[in-house]
Image (cartoon, helix red, strand yellow):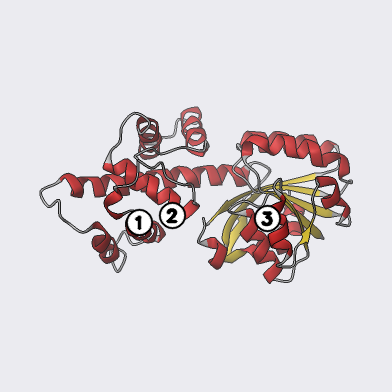
Amino acid sequence: MQIGFIGLGKMGYNMVLHLLKNGKKVAVYNRSPEKVKAISKEGAIGTYSIKELTEKLKSPRIIWLMVPHQVVEDVIKEVLPHLNKGDIIVDGGNSNYKESERRAAELKKKGISYLDVGVSGGLAAAQSGYCMMAGGEPETFKRVEPFIKSMCVPNGYGHFGKNGSGHYVKMAHNAIEYGIMQAMGEGYDLIKKGPYKDVDLLKLSNVWNNGSIIRSFLLEMAINAFEHHPDMKDVKGLIPDNGEGLWAVQESLDYKVPFTVNTYALMARFRSRQANTYSDKVVSALRDEFGGHGVAKK
């Protein structure tokens, strides 16, 4: 099968580079042509409309969407008239799993298969490879699997059930991420306001990340954050949320699952819009380090 990518943002661009590195033929389209031109120099087939993208690929083909969940519906409507029965649409963004279930059912009636794939790894995955969680029909997953494998770290992907399951487990993943970052932010805040206010938090993060129980990728990001934002002096404690944490909390209410830590982490993000604590500054800087989300500057 051949694959086309729609969306060359922070994730999509580097995912295509992994495919090219592993010898895959990839056609690409992006709303702004500059990125298309840039990645064409790396070997991708550049196109400048969705119609042109589909024409560059032979059916059966895979159309992989890496766009914000708010515009997935519009992109599907635009690409659908150019597809044939047997083609596959993959949503690699952070869509709500209920929307993925609905889209899969609607597309199936038209002879188009659908795979929802949660993608994790942040900016660092541009070098190391991604982690992916897929939901959809087993046969659809098998057809897309060679491309997924080319983009992921060893043992860093899996198929987790019917349509919706890929985005569901990614939603839970992101809620856990909220909780861990919130705990880190509050720990640094305690040190900052405690009796030893002159503790070097960059030095401490380096020590913690070598042999301690809490050593982790996010601690690596904390080290980067303290290097890029000494003492967080230029960071405003505003922490945006992209929706997944809220969806997870709503699911916990529907299924009566205690979700204390992650619910509090979501509420802390809402509170950050009214306050400006050191904890919030750390979490905001962490988000920027692993995902390139940016920080609100003073």
Residue 135 is left or right of residue 226, and the answer is right
| SS for dot 2 | helix
Amino acid, disc 3: Lys
Q: CA distance from mark 2 to mark 1?
A: 8 Å
- Disc number for residue 222: 1
Between 118 and 56, the one lying in front of the other is 56
Residue that label 2 marks: 289
Marks 2/3: CA–CA distance: 22 Å
Q: Could you say where residue 184 lies in the image, as x and y percent from the top left? A: 31, 49
> Can you tell which of label 2 and label 3 is closer to the viewer?
3
Q: Amino acid at mark 1?
A: Ala
Regarding mark 3 in the picture, which secondary structure is present there?
Answer: helix
Where is residue 109? Give x, y as percent. Answer: 84, 36
Quadrant occupied by the C terminus: top left
* Image x and y of residue 9, in percent: 62, 51
Q: Which residue is mark 3?
A: 35
Is residue 285 visible to the viewer in this orientation of the structure? yes
Residue at x-position 32% and y-position 56% = 226
Up the image or down, 278 lies above or below 159; here it is above
For the question of whether residue 136 can be seen, the reply is no
- Of pointers 1 and 3, the one earlier in the residue sequence: 3
